[in-house]
Image (spheres, rainbow, N blue to C red):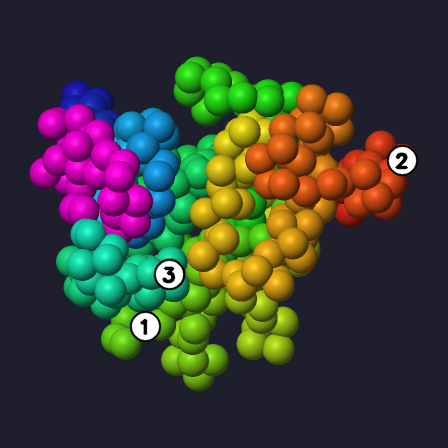
Amino acid sequence: MKIIYHNKKYFLYRIKIEVLFISLAIHNFLYMIAHRTLLTKKNIKIAICTMGKNENLYIKEFIEYYFKIGIDHIFIYDDNDSNTEQIYNTIDKKYKYNVTIYGAKKFNIYHQSDAFTKCYNINNKNFDWFLMVDMDEFLYIVDETLKGYLTNKRFDKCDFIKINWVLTTDNDLIYYDSRPLFERFKPPFIKSQFVKSIIRGNISNLKFWVHSPYFSPERNITCNSIGKKIYYKEMNFEVIKPINIKMAYIIHFSFKSTEEFIKKIKRGYRNWLNNGLEKFLLNKLKFYLEVNELTNEKIKLIERELKLNLSDFIKTINRKQIYIQRFKKVFGFIY
């Protein structure tokens, strides 16, 4: 009886030891997987390419936001007018090692497409992903970190990721307000078909347009913001339908205030001859007046600054009954 008891006790002891070793092995394996995943997420390098023209009021917020969400480096093409402060002088010293400024005119860059193309092709071997945005566009990742989002296996085969916009209104601001953008503008935002792009590094001879890279359908895979492949026949360089903002979207602070909207469209003057200028202005105004509250003060400011008479034009814009309803129905709001 003693021998049988001893064997049973020894047998139970061996089982406990083996269970302990198995538990330790499983723990070490899971730790290794988690550690590798964590290292992968930490080690990927992400850069932004952008071009700024007289955006000095917002550069600080732009830079701080993107470094906070996990961007490693920012490349800026400075297209400021010669009589304005240069972008380099507005950047906090703690960020200057992680921000590279190119003088747009020095590099013969006069359009965003050229800036994005040159920025990528010079630097593409040093970063895993590039985000191409304007200084009024802020990428928002819904339930993830940026590096966690881009290391998600759903994007393993994607060369380009197209991210839908959401648009802010002017929040009834007529003139510049010094509060940060995220304080001045709260949801609801307007969902938009328009996109900007995130591009994988190390693609040779890439050519970029404002919203999206040109691509080879045989060589490059384009995805939407949830990693679903977009097929060549469905491709559009500017927009994606259906709109998908479940995992990520870009908040486009497109208007800010009536005063700033006017300054923004004035920057486009140089691309238009006098005989096409009024048409250009009215096309820009049409969208602004469709989306934002229409007041006499706004109209008077626009007419005075742009030297236009908008009385007949405004009659064609029955905004409250037609356009806002159209946006709610087709694009919708997010809260």
Which residue has dot 1 on it?
206
Answer with mark 1 or mark 2, whichever residue precedes in sequence. Answer: 1
Q: Residue at left 74%, top 41%?
A: 309
Q: Residues within 10 Å of mark 2 (few under 14, many from 20)?
A: few
Q: Is mark 1 on a helix, strand or loop?
A: loop
Q: Using the image as rendered, state which of residue 5 and residue 331 is in the foreground.
A: 331
Which residue has dot 3 on it?
111
Residue 57 within the segment the image draws in magenta: no
- Give the quadrant of the N terminus: top left
Answer with mark 3 or mark 2, whichever residue precedes in sequence. Answer: 3
Would you say the residues marked 3 and 1 are in contact, meaning their CB atoms lie under 8 Å apart?
Answer: no
Of labels 3 and 2, the one closer to you:
3
Q: Is mark 3 on a helix, strand or loop?
A: loop
Which residue has dot 2 on it?
321
Q: Residue at left 26%, top 75%?
A: 204
Q: Where residue 87 sits in the image (x, y, percent)?
A: 23, 38
Could you tell whether 231 is left or right of 321 in the image?
left
Can residue 128 be seen here? no
> Three-letter amino acid code at disc 2?
Gln
Q: Residue at left 12%, top 27%?
A: 94
Of labels 1 and 2, the one closer to you:
2
Q: Which residues are the magenta region?
A: 76-101
Q: How crowded is mark 1: few (under 14 residues within 10 Å), some or many (20 or more)?
A: some
Q: Using the image as rendered, state which of residue 133 and residue 145 is in the foreground.
A: 133
Residue 78 within the segment the image draws in magenta: yes
Residue sitting farthest toward the right: 321
